[in-house]
Image (cartoon, grey):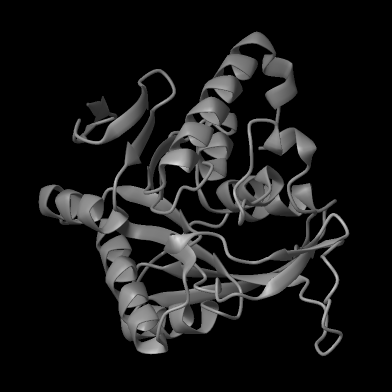
């Protein structure tokens, strides 16, 4: 299968739309990235967005719709020893680094459970940290224990492939998006609404508004975007909306099914109602 001048494996591909340049794989991202590194050792992607496992499913509780619910998200998110978590982060990040083009960048989202390991791994690999974004959620669930501040943010690290990376930043676009002012590194964006969950939901699903801002800031039309932990494929939806190409990997079958429904519906909606997809560029 080909997108632009790049050939991708057919094995494990569960969704392919050649017109929009979209590929989704049901596979382990590390195995998939190892295959691509062998084929394209000088990189292939202009941008990567990654929302890796937070490893916080340890029997804790949270609040959802006014009820106490467990935070266990699945086996993929089970709590692990910090050394193993960091080793995992180094492994997948090193492969992402190799798959970035010379001036490509990566965005990694996470809570305090994982983001400090990610940041340290990025530094150890010689990548260049460009910004750390604080994503503030206006209506976070309350802290039921009343022993901590209410968790209302996630950190997103933006980094270049290496210290020499001449990264893309579409300053004028982002300034226009921010009413003519320089945009700060604290972004107040609501969590995904009901319209984004009509086919089901992923426990760490990101709002498309967040991905739109990231994609608009750091890529051009027909650039190549990769998401190694695609989840419900919000990154893919943003890529389609903004006329970029997308490749994603997801390991969980139920989220693959959810992703396919979302991608197909989004592509059909864009074809039938193109005016709804007009964006600031």
Which residue corresponds to the image point at 51% horizontal and 60% vertical from the top-left?
51
Which residue corresponds to the image point at 63% horizontal and 31% vertical from the top-left?
199
Does 96 sit above or below residue 90?
above
User: Which sits in the foreground, 232 or 2?
Assistant: 232
Outermost residue on the left side: it is: 38
Residue 206, image x, y percentages: 64, 52
Q: Count all numbered tags in the image, as a single digit.
A: 0
Residue 187, image x, y percentages: 75, 63
Which residue corresponds to the image point at 66% horizontal and 43% vertical from the top-left?
208
User: Which sits in the foreground, 197 or 62?
Assistant: 62
Does 157 sit above or below residue 36?
below
> Is residue 43 toward the left or the right of residue 109 in the image?
left
Give the quadrant of the N terminus.
top left
Which residue corresponds to the image point at 69% horizontal and 37% vertical from the top-left?
197
Residue 127, image x, y percentages: 37, 76
The answer, for residue 184, to whether it is visible in the render is no
> Is residue 225 toward the left or the right of residue 171 in the image?
left
Does 63 sit above or below residue 129?
above
Does 21 sit above or below residue 140?
above
User: Which sits in the foreground, 7 or 258?
Assistant: 258
């Amino acid at each position: 299968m080909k997108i632009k001048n790049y050939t991708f494996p057919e094995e494990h591909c569960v969704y392919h739309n050649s017109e929009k340049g979209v590929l989704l794989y049901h596979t382990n991202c590390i195995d998939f990235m190892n295959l691509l590194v062998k084929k394209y050792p000088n990189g292939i992607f202009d941008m990567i967005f990654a929302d890796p496992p937070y490893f916080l499913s340890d029997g804790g509780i949270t609040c959802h719709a006014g009820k106490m619910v467990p935070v266990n998200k699945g086996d993929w998110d089970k709590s692990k020893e910090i050394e193993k978590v960091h080793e995992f982060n180094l492994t997948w990040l090193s492969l992402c680094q190799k798959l970035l083009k010379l001036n490509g960048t990566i965005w990694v989202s996470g809570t305090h459970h994982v983001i400090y390991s990610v940041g340290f791994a990025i530094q150890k690999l010689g990548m260049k940290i460009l910004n750390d974004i604080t994503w503030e959620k206006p209506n976070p669930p309350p802290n039921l224990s009343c022993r901590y501040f209410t968790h209302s943010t996630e950190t997103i690290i933006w980094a270049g492939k290496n210290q020499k990376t001449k990264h893309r930043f579409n300053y004028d676009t982002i300034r226009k998006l921010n009413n003519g002012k320089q945009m700060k590194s604290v972004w107040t964006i609501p969590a995904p609404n009901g319209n984004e969950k009509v086919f089901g939901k992923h426990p760490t699903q990101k709002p498309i508004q967040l991905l739109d801002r990231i994609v608009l800031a750091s890529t051009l039309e027909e650039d190549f975007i990769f998401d190694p932990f695609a989840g419900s494929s919000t990154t893919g939806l943003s890529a389609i909306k903004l006329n970029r190409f997308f490749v994603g990997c997801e390991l969980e079958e139920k989220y693959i099914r959810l992703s396919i429904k979302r991608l197909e519906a989004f592509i059909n909606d864009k074809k039938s109602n193109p005016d709804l997809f007009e964006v600031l560029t």
